[in-house]
Amino acid sequence: MKRKHKRLTFVGVALLLLAGAVGLMLNAFEESIVFFHSPTDIAEKPMTPDRRMRLGGLVEEGSVIKMPDAVVVFNITDLANSTKVTYRGILPDLFREGQGVVAEGTYANGLFTASEVLAKHDENYMPPEVADALKKSGKWDEMSEEMKRQGMIEKETQQ
Amino acid sequence: MIAEAGHFALILALFVAMVQAVVPMVGAQRGNETWMAMDRPTAISQVFLVAFAFGCLTYSHVVSDFSVLNVYQNSHSEKPMLYKVAGVWGNHEGSLLLWVFILALFGSAAAFFGNNLPPTLRARVLGVQAMVSVGFYLFMLLTSNPFERMLPAAPDGQGLNPLLQDPGLAFHPPFLYLGYVGFSMAFSFAIAALIEGRVDAAWARWVRPWTLAAWCFLTIGIVLGSWWAYYELGWGGWWFWDPVENASFLPWLAGTALLHSAIVVEKRDTMKAWTIFLAILAFSMSLLGTFLVRSGVLTSVHAFATDPERGVFILMLLLVVIGGSLVLFAVRAPALKSTGVFKPISREGGLLLNNLVMSVAAAVVLLGTLYPLFLDAVGGAKVSVGPPFFNMVFIPLMMPMLIAMGVGPMLSWKRSDLGAIAKRMRLTFMLSIVAAAAAWSYETDGPFFAIMGIGVAVWLFMGTLIELAERIRLFTTPLGESFRRLVRQPRASWGMTLAHGGLAIMIAGMAGAGGWQVESVQVMKPGETVQVAGYDFTFRGAEDGQGPNYSVIRGVFDVTKDGKMIVELHPEKRDYPVREMPTTEAAIHTMFTGDLYAVIGDHEGTEGGYVTRIYFNPLVVWMWFGTLVIVMGGVISISDRRYRVGAPARQVAKPAAVKA
């Protein structure tokens, strides 16, 4: 085999690998990318049932109900709309009413079934998606001073 | 006073680094030996200055000097001493100080052990190293000064994030940084080689121990982080494809490729430009990781620096370092002539395949990590790319490489015969199929890749053993002769055998824990029992208690199997009053076959019931053990005589010099 042919073999193998990776990625992108929605999105746009998505906002005050068998029902709100969420399991340590939260799961018939609930890891932190959802719903300014001291806004005004 | 002294030392270090970045470089270019000789005193004084600065910050943390802003924000007088010290690097400013400290340490180590390096190469390596330092000193002094005062002093601090108050995490950042920054040595050597226009076997031998050391540290750092996530987050998982995890995984992939391609440069005098490229890539990925974590562009626990100014600075630094080195690469790399030729089926071919897969895998992880950021930046939809994506792409990509890895070390250099190897691997192949079938029969609807993972692990482990057996001519010569050969194996070969074997063990663990985890969530009242994977977990109730700086609810579980007592588990839920933040402490009982893992949640109902989550995580300990074996392989490989100081100097290969 000549040097040139040999190099071609390697280039061929490399391209094959790359093509394989790209194929796998496109396939995976289609199936497993998770879109982020706010309660307003859910209220206004039709959602594909059984498609995994993330829902973010604040845990509505007074909405958390503990059901038997470790099931928790609560509302996630962006203060314009709210979505009912059900979750079975242990809520994150920092899950509290009035605080930012992101749930991952599926939505069908007015109920969001969460398989995962993520609350912020740190009391100074609000998930940017949640802050965004609140800004989009135009309710960011209505939030309490206490909430405003947290999350993004604090860091922004520090500049 | 102490803080000011530390600040001043840091400024001095900046100026020393500036001298180190310029004088030896110019000296090397002009052949001026006096100028070149400036490299060592500057590198060594730099490390003393930064060590002093680091000591000052540590002192401020230890004595809880709350007039220092950094101490106030991240410490508390009641925190245990370990976390007062760990708190030094548990925050943005302090972790950067650790970064530059380690950078200076590596630089001074090269100055100290670099006796046998040609003076021009050493001058250039240390010069490049100092350029990187200058960038980071400027970053610290201009945007993230750890010694900033806060007057008047506060009576007490705000405390460290309780999630981070953990021995696993106390040592996770230093190891990670030793790895990240360690690749700066490979990078400096690569840039110096590009400037010199020369890459040869001797160069590869000099680079290898540094790369290996960085790689070992990074491996330990990543696994410490994974281990921490496993027992501290209480989610029963150990790898979440979180952007921050990916940020540490990227340089690891590039570094692994670099380790393997450097072997080809050393032994066969080919793949030079590619190796240089990988060295640049490995360090670029380290910088990118630092950028992602430190700039706060990610939604993550690590993003405690939500500060655009800092982000922009690191981004600029990133562009200068990566862009500059790639331009230099584009200009100079064509001059690097390779002499070795080889057929596709050969040891070189196998190592190249490793390189290709590692690079493609790194590209996949990079794309998956950056895609949501990119989409967000251009105003597209908000998406998250999570474990399903990475598992769907990464695992199928790795499988062929792992299979090739089982036979790769048996291939001979230049050209090899797969047919002969296939014959020797026949038994191994059958064993792998049997293992996979056994895994399948354990749970017939088990996930495909876990079943395949078990098979591949057996294949790789046996392949590695057979390669060792052939090298020592086991059973073809008298046993005594084989034993002599075994003892005389070069340490680098031992390193390979251990690293590959360790990976096989690790893969078995990942397949087990990833594929057959059993989870059970329920409300349990005292006295109730649930069965998980054949183990009976009986809840005995929970009691309140006090820790050093937290209050605690501690649950008690008796675990039995077939009526025989196995262990008593004590999962905890802690509440740290300083930060008003609860954490979960999973109770884990490790066994050879898997971990019993219990978490206690909120109080439920009136009869002392609690929400509990119980897992059986099969083969988890294999992952940690496999990592140990892998790292042991790396350490033994570093100690190989051929890489030891002084050894390579006497056998500098004939320089494949091109005009500089």
Image (cartoon, rainbow, N blue to C red):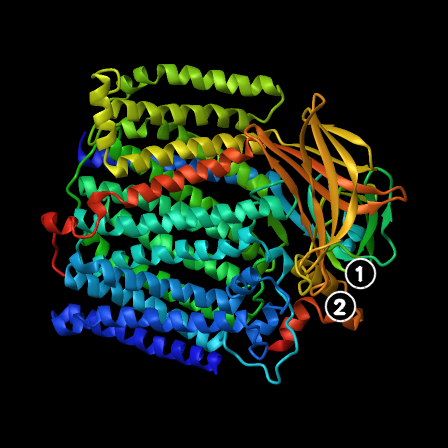
- Looking at this view, is B125 or B162 the one in front? B162
From the top left corner, tell me how far across and down residue B191 is, in percent. Answer: 26, 59
Label at residue A147:
2
Q: Is residue B11 above or below residue B116?
A: below
Tell me the amino acid under the disc marked 1: Gly
Q: CA distance from mark 1 to mark 2?
A: 8 Å
Report x, y in % for residue B2.
47, 79
Query: How many numbered circles are shown?
Result: 2
Foreground of the two, B122 or A133:
B122
Compared with residue B27, is residue B632 higher up or lower down, i.e. above or below? Answer: above
Q: Are marks 1 and 2 in contact (CB under 8 Å)?
A: yes
Q: Position of residue B283 (x, y in %)?
A: 37, 56
Per the image, the residue denoted by label 1 is: A98
Q: Residue at x 61, y 29 (%)?
A: B516
Subunit of label 2: A
Quarter assignment of residue B440: top right
Label 1: element kind: loop
